[in-house]
Amino acid sequence: MPTIKYVYAREILDSRGLPTVECNLWLDTGHQITTSVPTGTSRGKYEAVELRDNDKSRMMGQGVLTAVNNVNTIIGPQLIGQDPTKQVELDQLLLTLDGTPNKARLGANAILAVSQATLKAGALISGLPLYNYIHQLFQIPNGLSLPSCVYTVFNGGKHGAGNLDFQEFQLIPATNLDFNTSLDIAVTFFAKLGEVLTSKGAIHSVGITGGYAPNLYNNADAFEILVEATKMTPYTYAQDIFFGLDVAASQFFSNSKYTLKDKTQPFSSDELKEYYVKLKNLYHLMYLEDPFAEDDRKSWKELTAAIGENTSIVGDSLLATNKDRMIKAQTEGLCNAILVKPNQVGTILETIQVIQQARAANWQVIISHRSGETTDDFIADFAVGVNADYVKFGPANRGERTVKYNRLLAINQELHQK
């Protein structure tokens, strides 16, 4: 059985021009694996530690040379001679080497880079496509199929330009449509949306993840623009095309109130809940991510009870891809879906355990990119391998996003050739 010969990490730049970790792994067969990890802009306080150098003399303190050194001097030597197909054992070794509950010693960015590299190496040895290897290795139930897509179309919040309070306005093609049709909807809609913005004299530069960042008066105006763009496509609103929101509500939460451009006075939690219900009824909203601050648990529960039967109430910062936090949220009925980001937890093993717990509770699973992405398409294979319900990779533009959609195109072709 081929074994690991050498592991080496280095600092590279993500899509925002900020540092992240790339990991190279060599097998004794001479084969080489390369993978990289994304980074986040709006990181929740319950996420695992993304280790930064905090050296203000370089990279604005955002360097990851410490994390890189941890791979090269602490983690890498422990992997030499190991069988990369033993993913569970290797991830457990990484957790032992770190020894902290939140990856504070070695860094989740260092640990995940190695965890991904070993998974890719295991797939190479097995002779299986990565998605199929993941599916078999972790005994994922049901056959392989592509997830539906949640496409970003507007960037606001920390991803925008001070234009909109909500972090992402999302286009969601109907789940009964095939992937090729879904991608056609995304491409067509985005082009028409640009035309609508131009016709109204609105700024249509893009935000951090590539969605438009227009200068609109408030968040409700954005929905009216989306409806108008829908009418310019060959697709039918509320039949082929639906909308969603990544609210990232913690960003505008202060003193127990939520401050939005849509109202002169801040919203109370109850008022914001009613506003979401109104938006759902007006604009066929089917997806709400992080609608309240992480610790506003009463509001999460009330909103899920009110509209959760036919709306995905998605926990991101609330859950932080953390199994213990998810179990507590399930017990309290806070939401009905989880956004899964491997770098929030730090290893593939722990990510799989979170997904398994979500499935046990009949929650939807959405596999997500981060705002600071790389051109690694690992997450596309991972989403297919675990049978995710949805993927969230951003808009269908910019290389770090389209590489994921292009990988889904290739997987889709492979699956239909069998």
Image (spheres, rainbow, N blue to C red):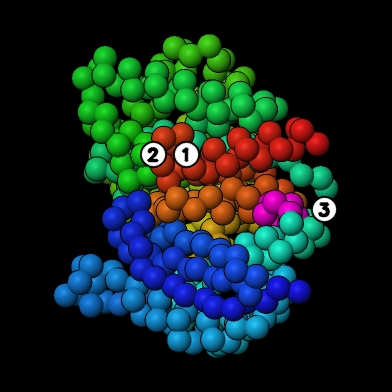
Q: Looking at the image, which residue is at 50% across and 68% down? A: 24
Q: Label 2 belongs to which residue?
A: 398
Magenta-drawn stretch contains 130: yes
Q: Residue 402 got which mark?
A: 1
Three-letter code for the amino acid on which mark 1 is drawn: Thr
- Whether residue 324 sits left or right of residue 237 in the image: it is right
Q: Is residue 195 above or below residue 373?
A: above
Q: Secondary structure at mark 2?
A: loop
Q: Quadrant of the C terminus?
A: top right
Residue 170 location in percent, x, y?
47, 35
> Residue 241: which quarter of the image?
top right
The segment highlighted magenta reads: 128-135
N-terminal of the two: label 3 or label 1?
Answer: 3
Query: Exactly how many numbered labels are in the figure?
Result: 3
**Residue 107 visible somewhere in the drawing:** yes
Magenta stretch: dominant SS?
A: helix
